[in-house]
Amino acid sequence: MTTLERAEAAEHALSQELDRTVVKSAIYTSGDRDPRLPVQRPDNGKYVMMGHDPRLPRMPDKPTLFDFYRYRFAPANHMMQSARLAMKNGAGEKVVLACLVHDIAIAGFIRGDHGYWAAQLLEPYVDPEVSWAIRYHQALRFFPDESVGYRYPEMYVKLFGPDYKVEPYIERDYKFARDHKWYMTSRLICVHDLYSFDPSVHVELEEFSDVVGRNFKQPKEGLGFDASPAAHMWRTIMWPTKYL
């Protein structure tokens, strides 16, 4: 039995102990199963999960951005260290905030095209320059810019191989972003993106309280309950096993 199979078996055993049946959504099974095969519906006499999953830490009734960091994005050392480096280097608050949140999609939602997903999550709550920069760091990180000392990450060579070529849409977006007025904001995310961050360095979220307070529009209803175009995405992160 592989490590993944053992983990899934343990998860299945835990779910069997719950009062309600936990069914993984398509986003969790996509890529692991043939999508042409029929999905097995639960038929064990239990109701299905339609809210908080007791295996996860419960979110506050009106969750803030920091609540998501504590309960759904943790550990977020990579993003916090990137934001601290930007702050240390004297970057503006928009860059610091962008560094702090640029990888939230990877941390709590989905890995593929994470820059686009993160931008969509954040658009209702941040300055357009911030969400734009996060969106286009998805493409810019694959292309060097010697004027600011940014080289193609060695980690990408290890992860993707020396002959990896980006998809055409990434190259298209890079060319578009290269000539945009907010190019440097997005490029500075790449410059401060710590691909090999130090796991021994401890950063507290509270270091960024002022920056977030001034630059993130926290809804009074709580993220996920404010009826914004992205609210449903925050609810999915909050309740990832909700059946429908």
Image (tube, grey):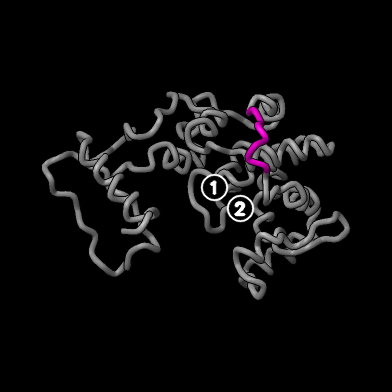
Q: Which stretch appears magenta?
A: 198-204
Q: Which mark is residue 234?
A: none
> Looking at the image, which residue is at 33% across and 33% down?
52
Q: Which residue position is annotated with label 1?
A: 105
Figure label count: 2
Query: In the displayed structure, does residue 142 sit left or right of residue 91?
Result: left
- Secondary structure of the residue carrying numbered label 2: helix
The answer to the question of whether label 1 and label 2 lie on touching residues, with beta carbons closer than 8 A, is: yes
Q: Position of residue 7 (x, y in %)?
A: 34, 49
Q: Position of residue 14 (x, y in %)?
A: 26, 40
> Looking at the image, which residue is at 61% across and 53% down?
115
**Looking at the picture, which amino acid does disc 1 mark?**
Ala
Q: Main secondary structure of the magenta part?
A: loop
Gap in angstroms between the C-alphas marked 1 and 2: 7 Å
Q: Which mark is residue 115?
A: 2
Q: Quadrant of residue 20?
A: top left
Q: Position of residue 129 (x, y in %)?
A: 72, 45
Q: Residues within 10 Å of mark 2 (few under 14, many from 20)?
A: many
Q: Is residue 157 magenta?
A: no
Q: Is residue 201 magenta?
A: yes
- Secondary structure of the residue carrying numbered label 1: helix
